Image (cartoon, grey):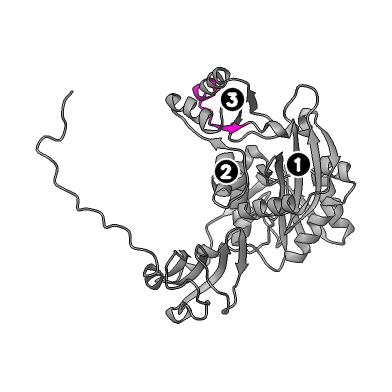
């Protein structure tokens, strides 16, 4: 395949390892500076220019987009997607993972274990938010911090209030998160490639430091993850829209707690700790997937007038409970079921004999009018009344 690695650091260990792994496997590979692209929006077909010249065709790209160029970098990745070039990490996936609040909001809907978290802006809401996550000590995180930067442990409520007020005063957005005491300054970094964990290590903080990041001096050791940790890491990456990711997890009393999903994980620490060819696993995955570029399904499927994508929920007592998909009559109503979600299990392209259960969620494509009939009616909004004669009461 012909591969482009998008990176502003061609001499960095991770970039060099990926380039070497691709060359060793006989692929053509170039490292391209992400900021040297120009996006051509003037023609009928999506196009890109690099260093002032029209970009030649590529089978795949591997984005290594730094936090400082997220907006422009994801725009370049999105343009490659529009050109049907395969990327293991979509622009949306990179954006989702880069914003800690957005990532937490997305993961929280899918029953992924996470430390209790709150997000507030008003000073009066800070103390209730601290209590909401279990009280002090709490961890305060900047939304776009990386490598442990912008992560502060506040030992008491008073200290937490002072830190949050100071950060808010400089227009910084912060998350308030429970401190998981049992993790004891340790966490797990799992590298997810495709639908499996290819390597994992435990990072241990040194001295009084509670952050276990390698950049903060943390010690690393290889670790074999059990099925629960592996499944959690893979699901978290895939929910984010990432096929290559570093998933950081705490070892909670009740199982793994996801802290962060990184779209551009460093390879030096994990390869040194495990002695595994992680870069090679990433290149092999991309080579196997080049014929299947990521497609924005909603964008492609909603261009037909009257058709769209919707999620239908099988509610208790509904006629669909106990029936198979074939018996449901959905296909007769011009509705195709793309995936069936049951708890944490996803069943793609479910068979017609699959029985439906209470709580199942069906991701469907079909005629919107037909799907609208299957969504419970909401209470009709009351009519807007005329403005009162005295619209504002003084005092």
Which region of the structure is painted magenta? 166-178
Asked if residue 2 shows in the view, the reply is: no
Give the crowd class for mark 1: few <14, some 14-19, many >=20 residues within 10 Å.
Answer: many
Residue 180 placement (x, y as % from top left): 66, 33
Tell which tag, 1 or 3, sits nearer the viewer: 3
Q: Are marks 1 and 2 in contact (CB under 8 Å)?
A: no
Q: Quadrant of the C terminus?
A: top left
Question: Judging from the image, what secondary structure is the residue with disc 3 in?
Answer: loop
Residue 219 lies in the magenta-colored region: no
Residue 188 placement (x, y as % from top left): 76, 41
Residue 28 placement (x, y as % from top left): 82, 60
Task: Say which mark, if any, is on residue 161.
Answer: none
User: Residue at (50%, 25%) from the top-left corner?
Assistant: 168
Asked if residue 195 shows in the view, the reply is: yes
307, above or below 30, in the image: below
- Mark 3–mark 2 distance (CA, rounded to whole Å): 21 Å
Q: Which quarter of the figure has residue 318?
A: bottom left
- Mark 1–mark 2 distance (CA, rounded to whole Å): 18 Å
Q: Are marks 3 and 2 in contact (CB under 8 Å)?
A: no
Task: Say which mark, if any, is on residue 188.
Answer: 1
The residue pinned by badge 3 equals 136
98, above or below 214, in the image: below
Q: Quadrant of the N terminus?
A: bottom right
Asked whether 373 or 147 is in front, the reply is 373
User: Residue at (80%, 26%) from the top-left corner?
Assistant: 206
- Mark 1–mark 3 distance (CA, rounded to whole Å): 24 Å
The residue pinned by badge 2 equals 104
């Amino acid at each position: 395949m012909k591969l482009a690695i998008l990176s502003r650091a061609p001499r960095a260990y991770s970039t060099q390892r990926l380039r070497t792994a691709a060359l060793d496997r006989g692929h053509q590979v170039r490292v391209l500076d992400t900021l040297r692209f120009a996006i051509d929006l003037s023609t009928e077909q999506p196009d890109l220019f690099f260093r002032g010249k029209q970009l030649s065709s590529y089978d795949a790209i591997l984005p290594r987009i730094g936090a400082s160029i997220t907006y422009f970098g994801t725009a370049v990745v999105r343009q490659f997607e529009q050109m049907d070039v395969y990327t293991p990490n979509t622009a949306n996936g990179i954006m989702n993972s880069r914003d800690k609040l957005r990532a937490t909001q997305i993961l929280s809907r899918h029953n992924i274990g996470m430390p209790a978290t709150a997000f507030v802006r008003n000073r009066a809401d800070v103390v209730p938010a601290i209590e909401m996550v279990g009280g002090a000590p709490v961890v305060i995180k900047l939304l776009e911090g990386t490598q442990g930067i912008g992560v502060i442990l506040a030992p008491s409520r008073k200290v937490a209030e002072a830190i949050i007020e100071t950060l808010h005063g400089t227009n910084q957005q912060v998350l308030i998160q429970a401190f998981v005491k049992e993790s004891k300054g340790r966490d797990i970094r799992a590298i997810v490639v495709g639908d499996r964990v290819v390597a994992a290590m435990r990072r241990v903080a040194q001295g009084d430091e509670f952050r276990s990041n390698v950049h903060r001096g943390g010690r690393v050791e290889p670790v074999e993850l059990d099925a629960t940790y592996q499944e959690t890491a893979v699901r978290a990456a895939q929910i984010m829209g990432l096929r290559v990711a570093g998933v950081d997890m705490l070892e909670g009393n009740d199982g793994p707690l996801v802290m962060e999903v990184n779209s551009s994980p460093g390879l030096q620490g994990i390869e040194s700790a495990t002695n595994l060819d992680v870069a090679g696993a990433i290149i092999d995955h991309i080579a196997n997937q080049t014929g299947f570029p990521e497609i924005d399904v909603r964008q492609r499927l909603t261009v037909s007038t009257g058709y769209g994508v919707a999620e239908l929920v099988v509610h208790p007592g509904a006629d669909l409970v106990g029936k198979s998909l074939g018996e449901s009559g959905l296909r007769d109503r011009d509705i195709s079921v793309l995936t069936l979600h049951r708890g944490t299990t996803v069943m793609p392209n479910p068979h017609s004999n699959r029985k439906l259960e209470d709580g199942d969620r069906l991701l469907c494509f079909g005629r919107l009018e037909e799907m609208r009939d299957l969504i419970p009616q909401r209470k009709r909004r009351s009519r807007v009344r005329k403005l009162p004669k005295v619209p504002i009461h003084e005092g």
